[in-house]
Amino acid sequence: MMMRMRRTTYAAILMCGVSMLVARALSQITIVLPHEGSVSAFSNQAIVGQSIPNMPVRLEVNGVTVDSGEVRLDGVFEFLGVPCPRGPVTLKTTVRMKNGNEYSAERNMHIFGDPSSIAVDLESDEIQANGNSMLKGNATVFDRWKVKIQSGYFVTINAESLKVVEEDADNNTPGHQLKLVDGKVPFTLQSTDYVGPITLWLSTNSITTKVPLFAITPSVPFMLVGSANGTLKNLSTTGETTGLSPSEDFNAGLQKQGRVAATARGNVFGNYLLTLSLDTDRKLQERIFRDLDPNSLYSMYGDNSIVTYDVQSTSPLYAKLEKNQSYVMYGDFNTQLTKNEFSAYNRSFTGGKLHLQNADASLDMFGTMTNRKVVQEEIRGMGISGYYYLRQNNVVTGSEKIRIEVRNRFRSEIVISVKEKARYSDYEIDYIQGSLYFKQPVPSLDDQNNPVYIVVSYEANSNTPDNLVVGGAGEVTLFDALTLGATTVVENREPKNYVLLGSNASLKLGSAMKLHGEAARSTDVNTKGGAWKIESEFTPAKVFSLRPYYRKVDRAFVNATQSGSGREVGTTKYGTTLLLEPLSGTVVSGDFYNQTQEQGSFATDIRSLSGTVQQSLWSGGDIAVKVEDVKYDGENPEAPSQNLKTHSTLLSSKMRTSIVEGLSTTAEYEHNLEKGEKEVRPDAVGIGLEYLVTKEVSLYAQQKFLEGQGQLTTVGVNTKVNEGTSVYGRYEIGNTISGERNAATIGLKNTLKIVDELTANFLYEKTKNLSKRLAEARTDDHDAVSLSLEYLPAFPLRASVKGEYNEDANNLRKGFDYGVTYRLFNDFSIVTKGTSYLAESRSQTGYTKQAHYLLGFAFRPVDFNWLNMIAKVEHKVQDNQVVQPTDYYRATIASAHAYVEPLPSFEIGLKYALKNAFETLGGDSFSTLTDFILCRPQYDVTNWLNVAGELRLLRQRGANDMKVGYSGELGVVFVKNTMLSFGYNFQAYKDRDLVEYIYSVQGPYVTVRIKFTEELFGLNALE
């Protein structure tokens, strides 16, 4: 019995010992750091653990031994700077006991890889287009293992027609930069007034995600605000007033005047948005649209207010009823029929327009009465900002549409890129002179030697009676594959109408085949002509692509707003392009095109057949070899009255390789293997460099030498910045000027960042004997250089400066610009800008010179409000010594406007303006000195009674005459929002060399003024 008990005790002790040994074995080694499931951005990690002192320990990373060591006396071991691969990582430490047993511990963690995807979470995929709605979102960045990256990156947000509210981390980098913090990038989008589809782009580390949004018609409570006034006056006159305008202000006897002005906006009939404006004093003018002109009135007002025009109309009435992308309206509009090439019709009118659109169909119709004619001009860039002159100087104000087009130098019908330009922010226009001046220089060639054109379309005044112009276009997509469209335009003319008819069709069969066709026909007074084209693309596999085409434009076809209209008339073009990728990195291509153009008594024929092999290199570059046979039969550029028939067989090669990260070089060579009487293109050798400053901005330089002393040198800045990207925040100065106004006043939109506060732009061009290259767009010999700097620091100073030089066979041009905006202190700000331009004629004697300088200031106190003042001084010079008779004009204009409020109930408005002008025309000289004084005090006796007066003096000191006017008025508010005013007005014109007035007009008047809102008419029910 005792024996059995002992055996039982021994068994229990043995089992307990085993359990202790197992427990001890399990705790022989532990990993303290990193923690299980941790994540890190660092590839080198520190591994810290505990084990038995003085025991050997080794470390494995993903099953591979990477290090070993010994446990310290304190039982701690550590491995520092251990390289770990990106992605999931398993760390395993193993300790070896003296008896040979091994014990291990493991930890799993993740090392972030490079960003691979961006996930975007938005509150909604719709936003109201009211300019105030906010849409919150979050962006999350993942690596390729779908693990959320916590930090270390910036996300760039580009929101078409939306504003990003958060502060931009880098104003000098295109887009809006936001920092990734704790795995998220929170952002807020603010709407504008744009209605329609929007694409939100988010990018980081060369990956991009796009998110579709839609800006819907906003929900706006209906509001109407207006005023009406009527005046009855009894005038007596002296002297001669016949012919003075308006007649009701100068004719004797009882006269009456009236005005109604109202604006309304808001939802009606549910979710339709109505915008309405009526002003009986707004007459039809020789202009289209109204925009903020930074050079009119005062350039600075001492605050950050922004002037916008919800109503774009020069007629008394403007009305628009809209829902999402569909609307019907009357007012100023662009026809915007621009989807097609031959039947494009893009003009600016005052009239009626209907636009209907959904996801699959669209319809546009318009009508107007006008006597204007449309003019489209194409001007080659000269490598400088200007001046570029239009052929006509009767441009209707606000009607111009300007874009910069880059066209293929061999095939002019191919538009490589188009950048629409905005008035004031991208260029300035003088409608009287017909001159253009851009903020940035316009190159003659891009970095691939393709020609650059300034395309200007505008309305021009004429003396003909108003005629009816109507038109429309419609398009529908069926089964997501077939698109059909048609266009009709009729301009009522004498003796025969102008008619433009067009049709288009597109067919898409999966990703393997695309077909597009277009046809148009025009009928004019003496001509009828047509234009048509068909294009196709066959891509049955990723490694094969075939693109044949045929197009023909009759010599009699007329469409002034067609892109390249003058250049493409009388052409027949056909050809095909073949692309084949037999191996990864190897591209074999073939190209054939035939071009015939009839111009006057000459016809030009160009035929080209070529084959190219391009191979990617391990260094990130590539090498290409091309053989081309070109035949030319047409005008001889060295003897324009003679015909030249020749051909060349050319061998060309081009290699591009990376030198260091961001810097690449290009070498090219072209040689005539065989040539006729004259080579189509002379032998050439060239070298180029490109340095990638950012993903969107690069510096490039190229030098090319052509046989026969030909030369092409270009150095400049390439930018891929989206033209719609807002950069106005860089120009804003608090309590001084808004970003939009300041950008239009002095901004240049430079994209090359020197340092955080300094940006630059640079362009240099030198071309010589490029006209010897027969079968491509010709470029005149010229030298041009442009350098500009913008200084946009954190303190309240914004400055820009630009210098330019251009020289060609006809002129030597020099230009200089500067602009400075500065807030000296919270109450006082100044702005100054200037432009100087000199063109010395080489083909004639003489020169032309233009200069415009401005200095302005604003005094807008923050701590008190009894005095506010704005003022400016301008100096203008126009000197033309080329034309006969020569013409020189100089003017200095100063003006100041002050508002004084010594008491809360008493205010005085003061204005003074002075103009000193001098002109020499031929041998005759003229000078004038004119000033204007205005003083208007008003005293509010009570909240229903006020007294006001006004004094006006216009003096012409050279002629010693003066116009004078004064009035006094007593106003009584006898009913809410209704005032009855009694007054007396006097105005006269006097030659101060005489005793009597030349004429005078005076008399009492009574005026009723009424203010009203929607409540007065019970229009709240429209909502």
Image (cartoon, rainbow, N blue to C red):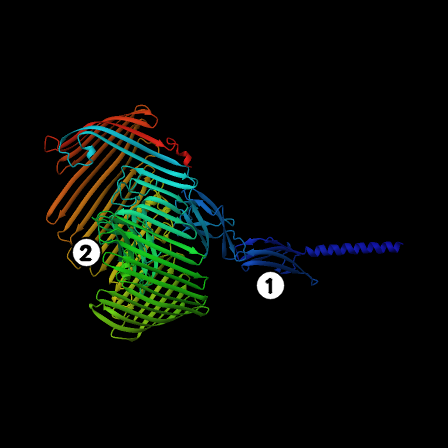
Q: Distance between the residues labelled 2 and 1?
A: 78 Å
For marks 2 and 1, the one nearer the N-term is 1
Left or right placement of residue 996 versus residue 436 in this view: left
Q: What is the x, y in percent for residue 554?
A: 28, 62
The quarter in which the C terminus is drawn is top left
Q: Which residue lies furthest to the right in this view?
A: 1
Q: What is the x, y in percent for residue 245?
A: 19, 36
Depicted 950 relative to depicted 853: above or below: above
Q: Mark 1 points at which residue?
A: 65
Q: Which residue lies furthest to the front in this view?
A: 495
Tell which of 95 and 553 is nearer to you: 553
Q: What is the x, y in percent for residue 798?
A: 33, 46
Q: In this orientation, does residue 157 appear? A: no
Q: In which quarter of the image is residue 91?
A: bottom right
Disc 1 on helix, strand or loop? strand
Disc 2 on helix, strand or loop? strand
Tell which of 206 and 209 is nearer to you: 209
Q: What is the x, y in percent for residue 563?
A: 30, 57
Amino acid type indicated by mark 2: Glu
Tell which of 738 and 978 is nearer to you: 978
Depicted 953 relative to depicted 332: above or below: above
* 2 or 1: mark nearer the eye: 2
Amino acid type indicated by mark 1: Thr
Depicted 706 relative to depicted 937: above or below: below
Left or right placement of residue 686 versus residue 431 in this view: right
The quarter in which the N terminus is drawn is bottom right
Label disc, if present, on residue 840 of the rendered structure: 2
